Amino acid sequence: MPDQKIFIFDTTLRDGEQVPGCKLNTKEKIELALQLEALGVDIIEAGFPISSPGDFHSVEEISRIIKNASVCGLSRAVQKDIETAAQALKHARRPRIHTGIGTSDSHIKSKFNSTREEILTRAVQAVKWAKNFVDDVEFYAEDAGRTQNDYLARVIEAVIAAGATVVNIPDTTGYCLPDQYGEKIAYLVNNVPNIDKAVISCHCHNDLGLATANSIAGIRNGARQIECTINGLGERAGNTSLEEVVMVIKQHKDLGFYTGINTKALNPMSQLVSDTMRMPVQPNKAIVGANAFSHSSGIHQDGFLKDASTYEIINPEEVGAEGSKIVLTARSGRSALAFRLHKIGYSFTRNDIDTLYERFLQVADTKKEVMENDLHELAKTYQ
Ligand code: KIV
Ligand code: ZN
């Protein structure tokens, strides 16, 4: 039985909301926060309080209303940011301040025109400052994916000594390969002497489509928290998709991990986020896409109708999806045609189906999909 809990840190309301066109008002943020809590996420990153008065207000209201999950506010390694985050989180039952700074040479030189030593000092000061307001302080080393491991280890050791309870290792640009990201986490586990005093967190972006794979590589090498968003929303190509990592963990029990997520709520949650953020979900999206449980080619349909597990590794009910679909196209086979005709009340013999199938193909070749009314027409031609 899996015995290692992976904490799910949802950042739909912060990193997810940074997507152009996805901005949320306070009412929408509160509704989503309540549903995220019901979904079972451990930490809700509610926003970036210093960024605007509206976001401050949202974090404040979410802090009042959320009972079980930790509520987190983002800040830069800047005193005013940290104080503002602390103020917005004042009413939270479990407040967390998420503060940090860029640690890659590119960030140190181009963004800060600074040095490694100065950045290390600022990181430590930020964590110490945040500790004046809350016990739970998460430190992010922005662009850790492109930060040299030996320097990253020094920063992480120092911020843990300063009181960080969680250390976030973001692959901010989605650059790492899964092996590289996993090795980075393993390096920290093996080279930071006080690492067992903090939880290591994965925060992966999806610029190369590797965010889910990288997060899983992270937990396999010692990380215990995954930062993710519903539908994988986030800056540029997005963040790690919550539904994907949760289902990887659930389907691969051999990894020894579990999460507190109620997986039956995944599809309704995806729909709610998509509607509220006005951001459609791509049909082929794993777990929550419209085609995630659709079968349209003859070979697959035949196998699926004999035994669903031949072509489905997840029962759609388990993730709150509508159910499996047998879609009829010119690539479909006889068993799918018979199945769909039977579903709408027609019982034909095998020979009848052979004849009907030829007519079906003529119709199917003229359409993207053969619909129920087409099937009624087809059946009529045979009566
Ligand atoms: O991608 C990133 O590095 C971030 C940090 C602010 C945590 O979102
Ligand atoms: Zn991010």
Image (spheres, grey):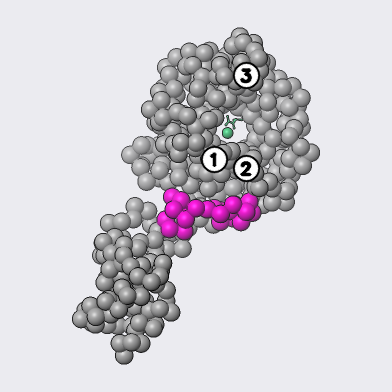
Q: Where does the image place residue 35, in percent across and percent down from the top left?
A: 61, 51
Alpha-carbon span between mark 3 and mark 2: 24 Å
Q: Residue at x 79, y 38 (%)?
A: 53
Q: Earlier in the sequence, mark 3 or mark 1?
A: 3
Q: Main secondary structure of the magenta part?
A: loop
> Mark 3 touching mark 2, by CB under 8 A?
no
Sequence-first tag of 2 and 1 = 2
Q: Which residue is mark 3?
A: 110
- The N terminus sits in image quarter: top left
Residue 186 is tagged as: none
Q: Amino acid at mark 1?
A: Gly
Q: Amino acid at mark 2?
A: Val
Judge the density around disc 3: few (<14), some (14-19), many (≥20) Cα neighbours within 10 Å. few
Q: Secondary structure at mark 2?
A: loop
Q: CA distance from mark 3 to mark 1?
A: 23 Å
Quadrant of the drawing holding the C terminus = bottom left
